[in-house]
Image (cartoon, rainbow, N blue to C red):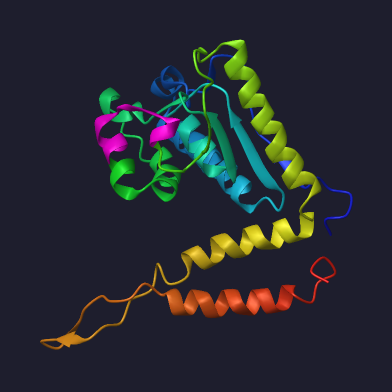
Amino acid sequence: QRDGLPNVLVLRSEGPVFSSGHDLKALASASHDEVKEIFSLCAEVMSLIRRSPAIVVCPIQGLATAAGFQLAMTTDYPIALASTQFCLPGMGLGLPCTSPSTAVSRRLPPALAYRMFASAETVRADQLHGAVDVVPVPEQAEQGGSAATAAFETRVSEVIQKLAERTPGQSQALGKWAFWTQRSIGQSSSILGPEIKGEEVAGGDDYADAAKWAGRVMALHAKSADAK
């Protein structure tokens, strides 16, 4: 079913800002039902990125804040210069970034994600603990300078070429689905442990269930044409 379809989608923008998220003035003037619809559509867009069978690469060429940060962290392969800035500013504006934090908290270490959520402080890409593919800024180069831009675009081209030409689209599609599915196995179920005073206590991380499921998927995929 992937024949003739793109193996990679590229989500990017132009200018000094990747995305500043929602228009807060528009939210302030909208009715409650209109605001609910806006955030429902936002969630749908994020879910479509996650469900896309083609891997989504995201070159982040400038500041990503609020839902723009969410958008970048929802994609499969975000790329940014080391000096690119990210922020969840809502707490400082009276509107905590609870929606954007869904993606951020799943991509970043929980403690860092919560600090960003609670403090509204700006963090550089090289402080995000591997959440993005960080491109070093060349020495003596400015963030928006030609040398930094060239280094960024070179890395973006390398990633897209590798994903588009060196890995089959069908494998990427099934692999993406399986990866995120095994990550969620057991997270909503109760975890059994020893009883203390007649009550169960948490213990274990459902690795065994995830490993068994992922093994069955891999065994199935081993018989595909691409694997052969």
Please check the rendered image and state whether residue 123 is part of the magenta-colored stretch, yes or no: yes
Picture quadrant of residue 198: bottom left
Q: Which residues are magenta?
A: 115-127
Please check the rendered image and state whether residue 57 is part of the magenta-colored stretch, yes or no: no
Q: Nearer the viewer, residue 103 or 222?
A: 222
Q: Position of residue 133 (x, y in %)?
A: 54, 38
Q: Residue furthest right?
A: 4
Relative side of 131 to 112, left or right:
right
Relative side of 140 to 4, left or right:
left
Which quarter of the image is occupied by the N terminus?
Answer: bottom right
Relative side of 14 to 126, left or right:
right
Q: Nearer the viewer, residue 45 or 1?
A: 1
Picture quadrant of residue 176: bottom right
Residue 13 appears in view: no
Q: Residue furthest left?
A: 197
- The residue that appears at 66% across and 74% down in the rendered structure is 218
From the image, give the main secondary structure of the stretch colored magenta: helix
Residue 109 appears in view: yes
